[in-house]
Image: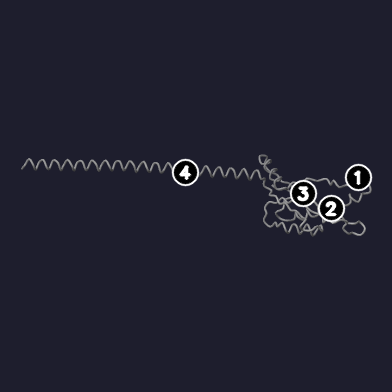
């Protein structure tokens, strides 16, 4: 149940017996955000050039993360940038390093997510060539759970096939037994009928000989 709090925020209430399941679902869907401390904060009054560069990279990466989080299937996004080193005065590259970027997306489903579009978005925002952007997409469902479900389904299917084969074998055995029994009975009736006919013919011949 969703409830509006006096401070304008929303809260969710669930029965006690569903509390653990609700927390697991919120964690799986990445709905609980933890406050991350920014490790780039400087303790000195004057930041060094490297600290300023690192701060700029991290701020830009966070902006790209927020942009990626606006995509519907994206549950979580992490971006790491290694920008092109520039001369602080002339603003020109000071080395042949073209920079690089790494992106990890946790998605509910992969529909509508195209890696080349993600690469272009990051490249356009950071100035890093698209070829130097690496994108990793991960599903929100745990792999272990998927493997266990697949294993259970496989074992269930194997058991069903084995039971079906066993049932067919038993049915075929019963059918063969019935056919064999019918054959034996039919053969017995045939032999009995033939024996009676032979005896009847022999008695008739004896009677004819006696009359003559």
Q: Real-space Cα distance between discs 2 and 1?
A: 18 Å
- Residue furthest to the left in view is 212
The location of residue 122, given as percent across then percent down, is 78, 57
Among numbered discs 2 and 1, the one appearing first in the sequence: 1
Q: Give the numbered dot on residue 9.
A: 3
Q: Is 92 placed above or below 211 here?
A: below
Among numbered discs 2 and 3, the one appearing first in the sequence: 3
Secondary structure of the residue carrying tag 3 is loop
- Residue furthest to the right in view is 45
Q: Real-space Cα distance between discs 4 and 1?
A: 74 Å
Among numbered discs 4 and 1, the one appearing first in the sequence: 1
The location of residue 55, given as percent across then percent down, is 86, 51
Give yes or no for contact between labels 2 and 4 (Cβ–Cβ under 8 Å): no
Left-right relation of 26 to 164: right
Q: Real-space Cα distance between discs 2 and 4?
A: 64 Å
Q: Nearer the viewer, residue 20 or 190?
A: 190
Secondary structure of the residue carrying tag 1 is loop
Residue under label 2 = 57
Residue under label 4 = 165
Residue under label 1 = 43
In this view, the mark in front (4 or 3): 4
């Amino acid at each position: 149940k969703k409830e509006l709090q006096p401070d304008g925020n929303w809260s969710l209430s669930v029965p006690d017996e569903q509390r653990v399941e609700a927390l697991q679902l919120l964690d799986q869907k990445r709905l609980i955000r933890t406050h991350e401390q920014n490790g780039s904060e400087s303790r000195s009054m004057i930041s060094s050039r490297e600290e300023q560069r690192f701060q700029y990279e991290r701020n830009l990466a966070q902006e790209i993360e927020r942009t990626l989080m606006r995509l519907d299937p994206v549950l979580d996004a992490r971006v790491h940038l290694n920008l092109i080193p520039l001369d602080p005065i002339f603003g020109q590259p000071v080395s042949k390093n073209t920079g690089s970027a790494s992106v990890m997306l946790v998605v509910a489903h992969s529909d509508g997510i195209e890696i080349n579009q993600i690469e272009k978005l990051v490249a356009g925002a950071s100035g890093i060539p698209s070829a130097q952007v690496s994108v990793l997409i991960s599903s929100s469902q745990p792999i272990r759970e998927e493997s266990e479900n697949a294993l259970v389904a496989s074992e269930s299917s194997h058991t069903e096939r084995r039971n079906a084969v066993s049932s067919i074998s038993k049915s075929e055995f019963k059918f063969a037994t019935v056919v064999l029994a019918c054959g034996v009975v039919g053969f017995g009736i045939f032999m009995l009928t033939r024996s009676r006919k032979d005896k009847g013919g022999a008695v008739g011949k004896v009677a004819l000989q006696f009359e003559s």
